Amino acid sequence: MKVLVTFAEVAAVADNFEIEDGAVADRYLEYDLNEWDEYALEEAVLLREAGVADEVVTLTIGPRQSEDTIRMALAKGADRAIRIWDDSLEDGALEDVTTRAALMAPVVEAEDPTLVLSGVQAADDGYAATGVALAKTLGRQWAAVVNDLSLDREAGTARVRRELEGGLEEVTTVDLPAVLTIQTGINDPRYASLRGLQEARQQEIEVHTPAELGLDEDILTPTLHRGEMSEPTPRGDTEYVEGEPTDQAEAMADLFADAEVIEE
Amino acid sequence: MSDVLAVVEHRRGELRPVSLELLSAGSEIAEDLGGEFHVAVLGGPVEKYAERLNREGVDCIHTVANGSEFNHDVYVETVGALCEDLAPDVLLAPHTVNGLDYVPAVAVDREMSLVTDVMEVEIEDGEDDEDDEADQHLVATRGFFESKVRAPVTVDEWPVALTVRPGEWPSADGVEDVEVRPFDYSVSAESIGSTVEGYEAAGKSDVDITAADFLIGVGRGVESKADLSLIEELASVTDATIGASRPLVDRGWFESGRQIGQSGKTVSPDVYLAVGISGAIQHVSGIKNADRIVAVNTDPHAPIFDLADLAIVGDLYDVIPALIEKLR
């Protein structure tokens, strides 16, 4: 069986960033493989190593510059990589997760994997909805926030544990084929080997434009518009302690003593 | 038209607290839109739930006696049918693990705009004609980059599905005499492709972090497992208990019973000392009941500082040894 992993390259903001023209200034952004998707990729590679899956394909919506990150996924064990892009996607169409799902759906349909694994959320925007939206677009089953997974190929089902709030987990069986959104901690993602990185450099990445996928231009018209970013207004009563570590230690010790959690 | 429908959440016989927050959010939006505010509760002892949902601002409560616990297929079908019936402009649900498991599917099915993890909602009138309802826009404010920044998202097309971040709206209060209307709907067997088999408690722990008076929370700022000895030394000097943020549990440095936050434990110590924790929303929701919060972080923008009483902007590798020295 085939496993398809959707993954995103995400930006993280550095400490001491600045907002310019309504967005975090580019020089404070560091691009990397989305953490949740790393666990999804590892889960897929583990399934192949266990002989359950025979091929792992990744799917990314991203510009050419995301290919370094895609190669990282290849180096970590993906067999093939597919990328969807057109420069018009920079105009805000991707703010809408249902548009992302619509872009990915034709590729998933053509590849027809038994399992699609996707991270619970992207670290940069955190909509946490693409996987389930993709499943519904495809008319497949799904489960969100999965931290354990076993397949019953004969019954054609996946048995998953969904991580609910407050230390509670739900055990659910879903019909295959299915889309599962993978939570961090489900496994221990590997590092790419040097050899893997070298081999990944030679590999071809299949690229499709939305037009090639037969998508109507209408769905690429943005309907959600992200406005100007700002820093959250502080509550106002936080006391910042500047100075040397010894001064800071003293302020902390005073608070502990005042709260009577230590003896003076 | 211009109505709002909120679908509340319950689990094992209890409404979840976020449900009452949802009522505040919903009545606020309905008022801004000039429409009615409908609430729906699906599955379980719906009459009992309806009594608790009888709150200020609610115009009608729809009860759907269908199953006992959450099942996403049942929710997608039933909420879809309710939307068909009521044609709300705004569908509201909590931004929770179960909210995430069905709201995106409803949005796809019913071609609704979708904005998740929303912290604030405003209705803006169009510039051309303030009385023209069709020209109204919904603006949902949410966090980006792990809540280090926030931005408004303007939605062009109605109807809109929103998932609402827990803890952002107050719980609705006041008892009104709200109409309760049973909604008769049976889900077709073909539409069910998933079965919830039961619940299990996540990992146990020999230490009860919820009982600690002085709790130290450790996060990503600690670079290696060996460095935890520094925190252990501080804990021994102060007689504090150690808990951890999710990434350290994911790495296997701590058992899951020590995890603080949304998917772990909610704690209420006299003092919570957050060391190298940035303060992602999932963590912050678990420490809101702490009496006093002290945070040590190198990043002055770390969201944890917003919640802290005392903010120590500095390197834990300098600050913690100084603190141990001071307290010894």
Image (spheres, coloured by chain):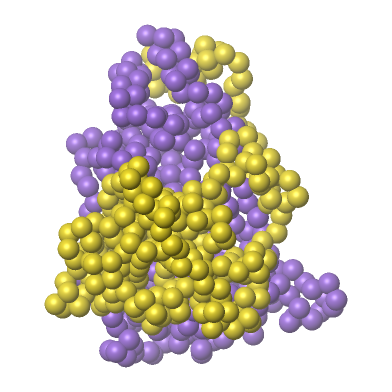
> Residue B24, image x and y in percent?
56, 63
The residue at 43%/44% (across/down) is: B283
Left or right side of A12 for B130 = right
Q: Quadrant of residue A44?
A: bottom left
Please tell me whether residue B158 is drawn above or below residue A76 in the rendered image.
below
Tell which chain the image draws in purple: B
> Residue A177, image x and y in percent?
29, 77
Left or right side of A17 for B106 = left
- In front: A136, or B32? A136
> Residue B295, image x and y in percent?
49, 30
Tell which chain the image draws in yellow: A
Q: How many marks?
A: 0
Regarding residue B287, the answer to whether it shows in the image is yes
Quadrant showing the C terminus of chain B:
top left
- In front: B277, or A221? A221
Regarding residue B70, the answer to whether it shows in the image is no
Residue lying farthest left?
Answer: A154
Residue lying farthest right?
Answer: B128
The residue at 56%/32% (across/down) is: B299
Please tell me whether residue A60 is drawn above or below residue A15 in the rendered image.
below
The residue at 31%/55% (across/down) is: A77
- In front: A88, or B234? A88
The residue at 77%/72% (across/down) is: B125
Residue lying farthest front?
Answer: A202
Please tell me whether residue B70 is drawn above or below residue A41 in the rendered image.
below
Quadrant showing the N terminus of chain B:
bottom right
> Residue A36, image x and y in percent?
40, 54
Q: Quadrant of residue B69?
A: bottom left
